[in-house]
Image (spheres, rainbow, N blue to C red):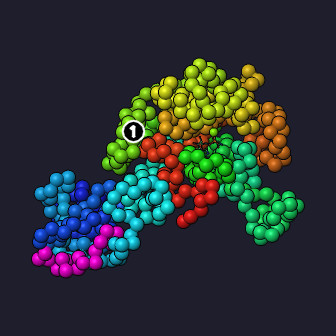
Amino acid sequence: MQRIRVKKALESPSGREDVLIKGWVRTRRDAKGFSFLEINDGSCLKNLQAIIGADTAAYASLKQINTGAAVALRGALVESPGKGQKWELRVATLELIGAADATTYPLQKKRHSDEFLRSIAHLRPRTNKYGALFRIRSESACAFHHYFRQRGFYYLHTPIITGSDCEGAGELFRVTSLPPQVTGEGSLPDRFQDDFFGKPANLTVSGQLEAELFACALGSVYTFGPTFRAENSNTPRHAAEFWMIEPEVAFADLKENMDLAEDLVKKVTAHVMQHCRADLELFARFVDKRLMADLERIVDEPYTRLPYAEAVRILEKAGRRFEYPVAFGKDLQTEHERFLCEQHFKKPVIVYDYPSGIKPFYMRANDDGRTVAAMDLLVPRVGELVGGSQREERLEVIEKRMAAAGLDKRDYWWYLDIRRFGSVPHAGFGLGFERFLMMVTGVTNIRDVIPFPRTPKNLEF
Ligand code: 4AD
Ligand code: MG
């Protein structure tokens, strides 16, 4: 006899005489002559209802079985007379695999707050909401891979430990194998030669620089991996460890880059809506009532595209008091980004041609002498989902930009070689995977879309 998962049992085209189900008890209800167990094994949102008659051998072993217990149930899958489910399990035998103490099990049958569930992140995937969330996370990751694979992109693994600082924002986590006393204040710079790599090493903030090298060999590549930032900003949209998807395409310009970002977000959102319907409905019901309508707009409508200068004009004329002032040359903040896509345009917006002063050295200088070919895709709820650019492919120009940014070109000889030998226009972007999940689920805190979030002063689990 075969063990089947609850999802398969619930989708069964016909009844079955003898099936084995293993899972965790969500609830137990006792009636006269019967007991009902709701069994969940994580394969889907729904529980399988199991009925245990007083006349069965299983009935005697029910005593120790409470919410949270792991059980194995054998019986017949029969049509359910009850509402809300097609099949139920008539249990013949029941085995307790692992008991759960009813008085100390933290997940009781009531709604727990997200804050409380964060403190028990090892158990929260057993709730309906977080089970659904992490199934959506899994399906979304596959959908990104599927999208690129279908379009001839190669999946590239870029290093997690690097010696470079792609974004130049200095938000690096240092990697060292030296004992603490040696890394102590003051002794660090002259000790790098004693350290593992013989020079300063850090966790990567982006795989872009390496992705550029491979795009200029394989044509179209993407990365999908963890990235790290020591930004001490305790916001609902920033994590110290997050996953980024970074496509990079040779012979592409800014326009093609924007087309790719828009198409990617649309197709993957549509995929999730199609493949995670039951799980998404939970979020549409309990987290954000406008979710489905918003997602439909994200999938169906063309995104607005406008230069940064025009976005600034709109924000200046908005008649709003923003916490951060708006002016040409200042970076857009989340409040500005959300105003543009939630209030003004009411759909995703791509802002391009940012002032060079607020963007990293690798972005291609525009002819106007003051902007670069950058683009950010802003979406409702989240603000910036994607940041990218056409890259500076002209050796003399990028060398000047690096010098201005205080970078030593000798450290980036390999990056500059790409501009020396067969240099081509190329472009790419980074999409924050967690921010994508916030967009599709309506969850407002990044800590709730990461299995075990890493944020300032938080390293539990
Ligand atoms: O805009 P960012 O900093 O761009 C880069 O790193 C480029 N090198 C990407 C490229 O062109 N290949 O980051 C890209 C995206 C942001 O738009 C945001 O969605 C996400 O990564 N992101 C974060 N997500 C969670 N927590 C953080 N601390 C994040 N910082 C950036
Ligand atoms: Mg950015």
The quarter of the rendered structure image containing the C terminus is bottom right
Q: Residue at x 42, y 60 (%)?
A: 125
Q: Is residue 63 magenta?
A: yes
The quarter of the rendered structure image containing the N terminus is bottom left
Horizontally, residue 311 falls left or right of residue 61, namely right
Question: Range of the magenta residues?
Answer: 54-70
Q: Nearer the viewer, residue 238 or 297?
A: 238
Q: Nearer the viewer, residue 188 or 167?
A: 188
Horizontally, residue 458 falls left or right of residue 113, namely right
Q: Quadrant of ligand 2?
A: top right
Disc 1 residue lies near ligand 1 with CB under 8 A? no
Mark yes or no: residue 53 visible. Answer: yes
x, y (%) of residue 218?
Answer: 62, 44
Q: Secondary structure at mark 1?
A: helix
Question: Where does label 1 land, which residue?
Answer: 291
Whether 27 is drawn above or below 153: the answer is below
